[in-house]
Amino acid sequence: MARITMEREGDVAVIRMDDGKANAMDEAFFLELESAFDAAEKSGARAVVLEGREGFFSGGLNVKALPTLGPDALHALHLAFARSMGKVFTCPLPVVAAVTGHAVAGGLILALACDRRFALDGNFRWQMNEVAVGIALPSWVLAITQTVIPPRHHVGILLHARPLSPREAAQAGLADGILSDRGDLLEAVRAAAHELTGLNAPAYALSKARMRAALYRRALELLPEERLPGEA
């Protein structure tokens, strides 16, 4: 069964991520995510909503599977990770995230690759924990995250792996709004997406490409020398 689905709601394409657990990321997840965004672009939608499941937007890479991967497989996973996050980051349509719970590591990267984010309030963690677990942040990750995280928070959030509650994330400028009810969250996200459909689509797509595409290409050029621990 597909973990990631896409359906049209008027002018908005709604992409839902739900594996019944933590929306853990692996190569299959990344392929499904890219396919959903391709389908959204081809559908004629004018904006995209990206939703997590209740309690989890995404917990990031499937850490249970990582130790089972050899160097070549780990490198392939890293390439798929970077490619799929870039797909979201450079999507020509406006993308609004409904962060429905925890957003950790790759899950937070994915949220920050969207254009706007609204968060569900609660005992949830937003964290870039890579440095804490021994992973140096690749330039492609920084290209995404540093466009959203204000410079005064780069050290705390990116370098010191500071965990944030949804409210702290909003105070730091990572979220556009906090809702205490899931239904209200999804309503707010759809309202934001519909508002963005009023923008001139070609001008939006071209401006976004000029802001992000070249930046991301340059960051990806460094990927061969910025491999994750254990990569070939």
Image: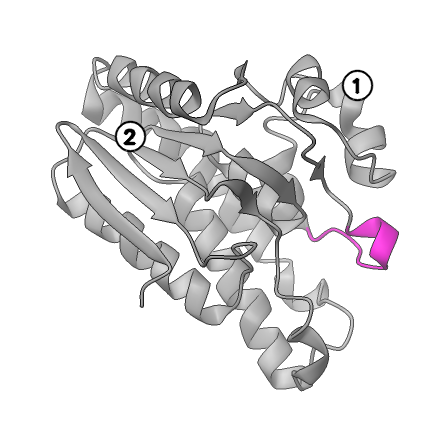
Instruction: Give residue 35's quadrant in the image.
Output: bottom left
Circle 2: is it few (<14), some (14-19), or many (20+) Cα within 10 Å?
some
Q: Is residue 126 above or below residue 221?
A: above
Residue 46 vs 133, above or below: the answer is above
Q: Is residue 37 magenta?
A: no
Amino acid type at circle 1 is Arg
**In which quadrant of the rendered image does the N terminus lie?**
bottom left
Render colour scheme:
one colour
Question: Within 10 Å of the Cα at label 1, are there few (<14), some (14-19), or many (20+) other Cα atoms?
Answer: few
Dot 2: element: helix
**Number of numbered tags placed on the structure image:** 2
Which labelled disc corresponds to residue 205? 2
Three-letter residue code for mark 2: Ala
Q: Which disc, if any, is residue 211?
A: none
Task: Indicate the position of residue 184 as horizontal and vertical percent values.
Answer: 41, 18
Alpha carbon separation for disc pair 2 and 1 = 29 Å
Q: Residue at x 27, y 38 (%)?
A: 14
Q: Main secondary structure of the magenta part?
A: loop
**Range of magenta residues:** 130-138
- Residue at the image position 64 percent from the left and 68 percent from the top: 224
Are discs 2 and 1 less than 8 Å apart at CB? Answer: no
- What residue lies at 63% left-to-right and 36% top-to-bottom? 145
The residue singled out by tag 1 in the image is: 152
Nearer-the-camera pick, 218 or 153: 153
Q: Position of residue 24 (x, y in %)?
A: 56, 59
Q: Identify whether 33 is placed above or below 116.
A: below
Residue 185: horizontal and vertical position, in percent?
A: 43, 22
